[in-house]
């Protein structure tokens, strides 16, 4: 299910959902949710088997039976949202307080997409129990491709050295994509990495627009999505995926991720009926208040649904 399908059915929430989706291609087109009741849910994963599947047999013989055992993964309920309020004194000053509240709510709720993107990448329930785990926490080392012992510079230019570096980069990117198994694959990177790919791999890129008119770049038909800036509301630049990771002796590296978002499979999110809601505006003391909130938890049902390319340098 997409974000629109897990939102509450009231008009107030529906209007705010459209504001969020205009700013968040991930929530608009790719992230998948599934609904289950309860404060926590169990989801069937791949299970275990004592050997490889598939062998041969002779006529009159039988296959050696493989013992399989079910396995389940558990998701709890995490809340992601915020509350805004405005002083009732503005009403006495002549403001149309209802119109003003809706206008401010529309502006602030657009930032929800960036809040979600930050949690999707950086969430860590070990350090912050109220967060769901992001893909940087869920990724396994077996699905991580390291660009080089000390990272790899994304060179510009047409020299033999530059061309070789560019070809090696694309080979590593293709390897990372191949190591993510499943459908609905998305490449998630920062804006500078995407810009550099635009410069060195333009012949492999196409651009489409989603239903909100937002341009979506595709690398070999796979969407290439900017993770974004989690402090954009303060007019600062704080990219969620920054060139601040350490690989070997290099401390100026970044990663990109490939995720297979599939409903109740791959990388998915457990939620409930009315999982996203914008609550009615109400007067509390000297303020009019409104809360918006998503109830969901991340769950990596298949470890093969995530891969990572680390060590990218400009």
Image: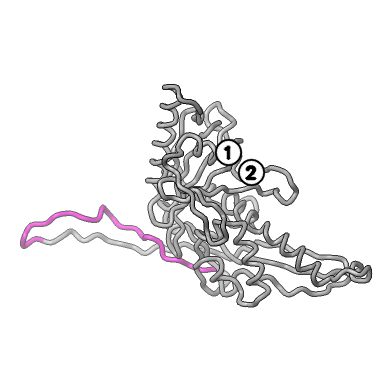
- Residue 120: image location, x then y, percent: 57, 53
- Please name the residue that numbered disc 1 is placed on: 192
Bounds of the magenta segment: 40-61
Above-or-below relation of 276 to 64: below
| In the foreground, 235 or 198 | 198
| In the foreground, 65 or 167 | 167
- Residue 146: image location, x then y, percent: 46, 35
Q: Residue at x 57, y 75 (%)?
A: 273
Residue 252's tag is none
- Residue 29: image location, x then y, percent: 51, 60
Q: Residue at x 56, y 60 (%)?
A: 27
- Among the two numbered marks 2 and 1 on one chain, the one whose residue lies closer to the N terminus: 1
State the CA–CA distance, disc 2 to disc 1: 10 Å
Above-or-below relation of 98 to 104: below
Q: Residue at x 87, y 66 (%)?
A: 87
Side (left or right) of 114 relative to 138: right
Above-or-below relation of 225 to 253: below
Q: Residue at x 51, y 71 (%)?
A: 35
Pick out the residue farthest to the bottom: 10
Q: Disc 2 vs disc 1: Cβ atoms closer than 8 Å? A: yes
Scheme of image coloration:
one colour
Query: Callout 1: helix, strand or loop?
Result: helix
Magenta highlight on residue 43? yes
- Please name the residue that numbered disc 2 is placed on: 239
Quadrant holding the C terminus: top right
Mark in front: 2 vs 1: 1
How many tags in the picture?
Answer: 2
- State whether the magenta stretch is mostly helix, strand or loop: loop
Mark 1, other Cα within 10 Å: few <14 / some 14–19 / many ≥20: some
Pick out the residue farthest to the left: 59
């Amino acid at each position: 299910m997409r974000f629109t399908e897990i939102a509450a059915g009231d008009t107030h929430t529906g209007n705010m959902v459209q504001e969020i989706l205009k700013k968040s291609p991930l929530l608009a087109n790719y992230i998948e949710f599934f609904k289950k009741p309860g404060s926590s849910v169990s989801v069937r994963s791949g299970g275990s088997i004592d050997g490889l599947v598939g062998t041969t047999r002779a006529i009159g013989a039988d296959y050696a039976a493989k013992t399989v055992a079910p396995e389940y993964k558990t998701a709890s309920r995490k809340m992601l949202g915020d509350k805004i309020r405005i002083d009732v004194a503005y009403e006495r000053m002549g403001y149309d307080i209802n119109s003003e509240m809706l206008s401010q709510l529309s502006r602030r709720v657009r930032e929800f997409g960036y809040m979600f993107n930050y949690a999707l990448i950086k969430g860590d329930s070990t350090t912050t129990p109220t967060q769901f785990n992001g893909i940087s926490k869920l990724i396994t080392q077996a699905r991580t491709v390291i660009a080089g012992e000390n990272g790899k510079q994304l060179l510009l230019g047409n020299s033999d050295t530059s061309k070789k570096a560019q070809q090696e980069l694309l080979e590593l990117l293709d390897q990372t994509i191949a190591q993510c198994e499943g459908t609905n694959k998305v490449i998630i990177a920062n804006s500078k990495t995407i810009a550099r790919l635009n410069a060195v791999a333009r012949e492999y890129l196409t651009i489409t627009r989603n239903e909100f008119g937002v341009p979506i770049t595709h690398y070999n038909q796979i969407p290439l999505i900017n993770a974004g800036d989690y402090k954009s509301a303060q007019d600062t630049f704080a990219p969620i995926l920054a060139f601040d990771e350490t690989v070997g002796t290099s401390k100026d590296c970044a990663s990109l991720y490939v995720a297979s978002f599939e409903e109740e499979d791959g990388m998915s999110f457990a939620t409930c009926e009315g999982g996203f809601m914008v609550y009615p505006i109400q007067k509390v003391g000297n303020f009019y208040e409104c809360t918006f909130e998503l109830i969901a938890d991340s769950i990596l049902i298949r470890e093969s649904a995530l891969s990572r390319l680390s060590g990218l340098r400009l």
